[in-house]
Amino acid sequence: PTQQSLELAKQNIITDSYAHETLFKAGTELIKRRHYESALYAHGAGTAALEHEGYATVSLSRAYVSEAILLLAMGDAVAASADFQKVHLQRTAYLSSRECALEEDLIRACDAMDGEALEEARARTGPHRAALANLDPSLRELVGEIRVSGRAKKEKKEVAPTKNAAPAVVAKKPSPPKKSAEEVMKDTDDGFAEMDDIMNQMGLNDDDDNDDDSDDDIDLT
């Protein structure tokens, strides 16, 4: 961006109290949907609002480390390291914060592609447990998904099979044997005979002899 566009952006920064919280909430929702680039944009806007206030606050420290976490989740350790050195470390108050120590160790582990150092930096019982506990739950979960190479990926938990579990066997229904032509004719005749019996019981099927006798009794002359 040009210097003119940066100045224009600064003039249009929202200076209302707690405006940054709305931006961070939007970023949290985007993290849950795994839209890290958009989440970084929202968090960056919130950070700019805090920087514009000119106060060195805990919120600003969390904003800096949140940006670093998102960049590492995107697999861009180079950009995370550049922001850390050129922007974040320029704030004297940030140097002594817990968030600064967490950011430094996460970036250093990813730069060196050191998996053990990364696990130590984000361990719940490690040296940065206090800084991690103060993060938003979505960011804390994202820290656990950061990899030393590539984008963050949620690990799939393997379900261990029970000791007595047996492999599921799907029983196949045996196909019915094919019937001969004689058997088909017999089944058909039996079906018709059964239908006749039912109709006779309901009085809907008179005998043929009675029908003939009735016809003889009618005088058509």
Image (cartoon, rainbow, N blue to C red):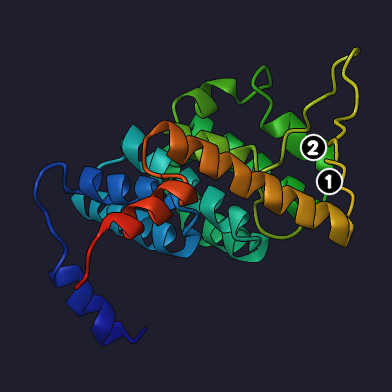
Please give left or right for residue 31 compared with residue 2 in the image: right
Q: Does the image show residue 100?
A: no
Q: Does the image show residue 23?
A: yes
* Residue at 68% across, 21% down: 126
Q: Amino acid at mark 2?
A: Ala
**In the rendered structure, are the residues bearing label 1 and label 2 in contact, judged by CB atoms less than 8 Å apart?**
yes
* Residue at 44% across, 26% down: 134
Task: State which quarter of the image contains the C terminus.
Answer: bottom left
**x, y percent for residue 55:** 25, 42
Q: In what element is the residue under mark 2?
A: helix
Please give left or right for residue 181 compared with residue 154 in the image: right
Q: In the rendered image of this protein, does residue 18 appear above or below residue 70?
A: above
Q: Residues within 10 Å of mark 1 (few under 14, many from 20)?
A: some
Identify the residue position indicated by label 2 in the image: 117
**Tag on residue 114?**
1
Instruction: Name which quarter of the figure residue 61 lies in.
Output: top left
**Foreground pick, 44 / 28:** 28
